[in-house]
Amino acid sequence: MAVHAVAVPVDVDAAELAARVRARVGARLWVDDVPAGEFDRRRSAELARPTDDVRCVLVRSGERASLVVAARRDLPVLALAAALLDPSAELRWEGRAVAAPAADPPPWGLGTGSGVASVALPVAGGDETRWRAALADVLAWYGGTPAVGLFVETTRLAGAEYVPGPPVHPLTLTVFPEGDGWVLRCDHLTGHFAPDVAERFARHVAAAYDAGVAPSPAVVAELVELGRSPVALDSTPTTISEAFRRVVTRSPEAIAVCDRDVRLTYARLDALSDAVADGLRERGVGPGDRVVVCLERTSELVVVLLGVLKAGACYVPTDPAYPADRLAYTARDAAAALVVTRLAGFPADDVVAPDDLAAPPGSTGAPAGRPPWDADSPAYVIYTSGSTGRPKGVVVPHRNVIALVDATRDEYGLDADQVWTLFHSSAFDFSVWEAWGCLLTGGRLVVVSYEDSRDPERFRDLLAGEAVTVLSQTPSAFAQLLDVDHAALAVRLVVLGGEPLDARVLLRWHDRHPDCRVVNMFGITETTVHVTAQTYDRGLALAASRSVGRPLPGWHVYVMDEGGRPTPPGVPGEIWVGGAGVALGYLNRPELTGQRFVPDPYAGGTAYRSGDLGRLLPDGTLHHLGRIDGQVKIRGFRVELDEIRAVLLESPDVRAAAVVVRDPGTARARLDAYVVPAGLDTRDLHTRARDILPDHMVPATVTALDALPLTANGKLDASRLPEPDPRAEPAAAPPPPGEGSTDEGLAEAMREAWSAAFGMPVGLDDDFYHLGGNSLLAVRISAALKSRGLPSPSLRELFRTPTIRELTTR
């Protein structure tokens, strides 16, 4: 007969143990004293020996003693063993040894202990078939796991209290009669399952037994509530320009924005942006029109963006460093009424410089009365990477920005005493948080030039000189700042976002700034910059937590399975975002908008399907687990690998292409491309990619192969792609005689700096990007050259002349 048995090390007196067995089980304790060499064999024999009732045997040998409790399958293994069970107990089921633990912990178990815990719940009945169906449904909903077992006991023992036994599986559910009702008991190894997780799992099984479906409506309601902010949003929708004017009225003489050359009060910024708005109107720009803004990061950029909003138009930010092809595509796709830029030769027809937008004589200023736009009107369109090979524009209304500011103002102390930086490109939505988060709360905005943003020492000096208190950074950029002495900074709030965080890098900051609050925010362009927030203290940093916290007031998240159902706590799924930050959709992409912006199933309105993988924990915090598809973050910018692939495939010679990311989520993140056939000129392909893609999307290497490796299902097998050899890339030809000579001293110093940065010998004609170069390595090379008193190339110079020979040719 099959045996359910457990052996537990004990150190209690045999007489006391016998009394317990007699009182709890109504049975005799057998004592088996054996020679030392026979202890293990005898204990194993007792575990395997069949029984037709309950058998308790104490096996002893000198200092060692184990209690073996065995029972038939249709009788309980009693509480005596469960109370004494520890992780070293040897379990057997149906004559076979079962390791403890019997399976790897599931990812949703969240266990950290080393013992056994139990919880009991009253339930509706003891129908074994129905219980097994409920468990199967719940396990399928949880993603399946071998770590759970179910025992349904239907025998009522007259005059005795029924107590089920220890877990045979790491989580064992036992249904048994008690009094006039039924009880579901969950015994679990705490190293596999946290007690609150195990209890919730048991409740979900019980709810499925009652409702006949998993998850039941009651369970769904519980999970929906788990993904909401515990704080309600207090916000009155308005336009950004109207909210700004209220700040001007309160503090007209306070400094609003500054750069290294200009300082503007709120009153002056208001007047200058009014003039820009008037100039735009004179050129036919009206409410709802889209204006492309392509300007360097200076105070002028802020003036123009605000002026566009005051004209009732929608700004479309682009970066002057973008290739001409991308700039032209953005202006064309946005159907721009006007382009405001100082960039010579911008590839569009209706182009104007900021100087030409001064209010003409007799201008009447802003229109009287209520403007013909409101909080629901588009404020900006930011273009993000697209899987079709071209970027897609995300349309965001004024009310979303107002809600973001109102959701964070009180929690993070955002007031007129704060000094912010505008560090990021206006084409990156982090800039929305920086610019309007500062100006709509009365703070002072320090605009960081491109050059200052790429030099950590200059940036550090700027932060110190301007006494910056609120610093927003991608983790990659923050890592650069941590490489220089930052002890003198007055920053009180660091907001991180834009890419995954390796929390351990924060330890160096906490050591120097223990009173500074560090917040990691998860967000998406389509949901207005930020969605959730997690304050990282030293403990979370040490634990390398992946938490991105709970939703901001007014935002909520769901973690959904493939069937569109909320997943249980701890179980991964797709992150959906609803609430105050959801954008209006994609510009000119109704089909894609319909796929990604869907009806919110539990709150009404619209939810955004992010394509990000995550899991909600029992405390309501969200863990971000990366992308479900091929989209990645490179230095804070969202990159769709298929967009890069599409650019490579535009070459008529390329038959197949693949792009992978190395070291994702780190400052060393790098894109490597592979093309077929093997005889392709990869240098030409790389040059073409540079002409079309922004620098953060240009592959570091392009490797030609005979064929792309595939899985059995015909999909790309990225694990079999060869590691690219940067040195195998074709070298640039040296300049012909008479076209310049190389500064040999500078070239040698640069070669040594490059070799140290890349960790390999570098030649004069090796391409910076083919070697795997990125902006972080450029910063390190620059610092090494400056330490020798030598000039260093900017990132833009590297982009145009990426070899040492080209950089040092006079």
Image (cartoon, grey):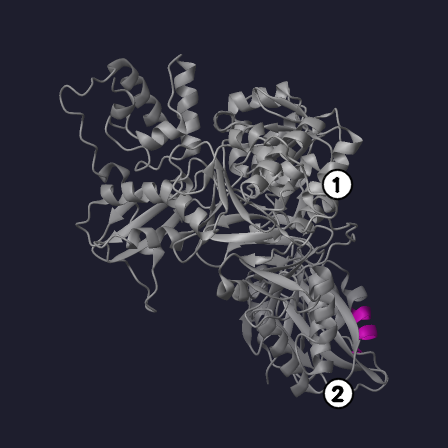
Type of secondary structure dominating the magenta stretch: helix
Q: x, y (%) of residue 486?
A: 59, 23
User: Residue at coordinates 59% horizontally, 32% vertically from top-left?
Assistant: 360
Occupied quadrant, residue 118 = bottom right
Residue under numbered circle 1: 409
Q: Residue at x 31, y 42 (%)?
A: 701
Q: Is residue 59 left or right of residue 733?
A: right
| Residues drawn in magenta | 18-28
Q: Secondary structure at mark 2?
A: loop
- Inspect this view and state whether residue 263 appears: yes
Q: Residue furthest front?
A: 362
Res 108 seen here: no
In the figure, 748 relative to 658: above or below? above
Neighbor class of circle 2 (other Cα within 10 Å; few <14, some 14-19, many 20+) is few
| Residue for badge 2 | 155
Q: Amino acid at mark 2?
A: Thr
Q: How far across and how far down the image is residue 237, in percent?
A: 74, 51
